[in-house]
Amino acid sequence: MISYALRRLAAGLVLALLVSVITFWLLSYSFESVVASLLGSGATDAEVQARMTDMGMDRPVLAQYADWLGAALTGDLGDSYFTNEPVIGALTDRLGVTLSVVVTALLITAVVSVLLGVTAATRGGGADRAAQGISLVGYLVPSLLLAIGLVYVFAIKLKWLPATGFTPLSENPGKWAQSIVIPVAALMIAGIATLTAQVRGAMIDELRKDYVRTLRTRGLSPRRIVLRHVLRNAAGPALTVLSLEFLTMLGGSLVIENVFALPGFGSFAFNASLQGDIPVIMGVMILAVLMVIVVNLAVDLMNGWLNPKARVR
């Protein structure tokens, strides 16, 4: 299992290297326009070329990438062209905001979806129809529309929650919880729909298998069969979907953070892409790829722990 994890990690790092090469190469075509934006609309071509020379952008792209990679391996992702703040510090500060929203949404999504999916599969009837109805609503209602509705009801009309802004958890836990309620709800609605359907389907497939009938003939209680055997075997596909939902929520945070004025990773990446802030874009890219690698590796290890047959030695 350890050797398998190391191989997956090595493959992930190679992927990160390839993505960084491709991203840097594509960004190299915008070097001149980025420098022109830095200097302002009144800059002449000569001034732009001179500034590019000062910044080392007139050198071969491969040499520039090698310099960036060498610095990145030491933890230095450079400084923002527009704010002059270190990229690594800016990303880590803002990532905490994003993860506090995304992880909270993911945990609630997992708990609610498992409860709904298991109940629908084991009880059937009205419970099954209700779970499928909730999933259908989650598929049909756009997350942004739901967020606007929640803002109107709970922030504008009832004034229970803030419409925008963010309070750090360390500063005031109560206000932190209030500040993330609506963004979390907007992120999790589609995730609950997808994961509930996955858990329900996997549970129904497992309940139809021969080993379940064998366990019943041995006198095991339905609760024990479901919790110790069926749910464990059905967890693999659900974990895979949950990992995809994490990545989806991470991407969705780009929109949510801009809508609700959250100082997170997504809004920072969005503004950097609009400005053409190359060091920030490269930092965002490499951090996003590393998170994908870590999440996928964690899911593979959890699947191996839940199901010994899935382990690769």
Image (cartoon, grey):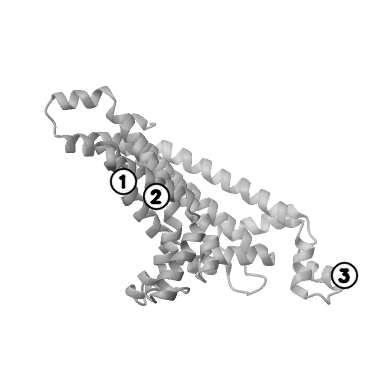
Residue at figure coordinates x 67%, y 48% from the top left: 22
> Label 2, on which residue?
192
Q: Is residue 143 left or right of residue 302?
A: right
Q: Residues within 10 Å of mark 1 (few under 14, many from 20)?
A: many
Q: Is residue 75 left or right of residue 297?
A: right
Q: Position of residue 238 (x, y in %)?
A: 38, 41
Q: CA distance from mark 2 to mark 3?
A: 53 Å
* Quadrant in the picture for residue 131: top left
The one of 20 and 181 positioned closer to us in this rendering: 181
Residue 201 tag number:
none
The image shows a total of numbered marks equal to 3
Say what amino acid the circle numbered 2 marks: Ile
* Quadrant in the picture for residue 208: top left
Is disc 2 in contact with disc 1, using a CB cutoff of under 8 Å? yes
- The label nearer to you, 3 versus 1, is 1
The one of 134 and 97 positioned closer to us in this rendering: 134
Q: Is residue 106 left or right of residue 282?
A: left
Q: CA distance from mark 3 to mark 1?
A: 62 Å
Say what amino acid the circle numbered 3 marks: Asp
Residue at figure coordinates x 42%, y 54% from the top left: 189
- Examine the rendering and report whether any part of residue 1 can be seen: no
Residue 45 tag number:
3
**Sequence-wise first label, 2 or 3:** 3
Q: Residues within 10 Å of mark 3 (few under 14, many from 20)?
A: few
- Examine the rendering and report whether any part of residue 102 can be seen: yes
**Sequence-wise first label, 3 or 1:** 3
Q: Position of residue 52 (x, y in %)?
A: 79, 67
Residue 116 tag number:
1
Q: Position of residue 136 (x, y in %)?
A: 43, 46
Q: Position of residue 76 (x, y in %)?
A: 57, 64
Q: CA distance from mark 2 to mark 1?
A: 9 Å
Say what amino acid the circle numbered 1 marks: Leu
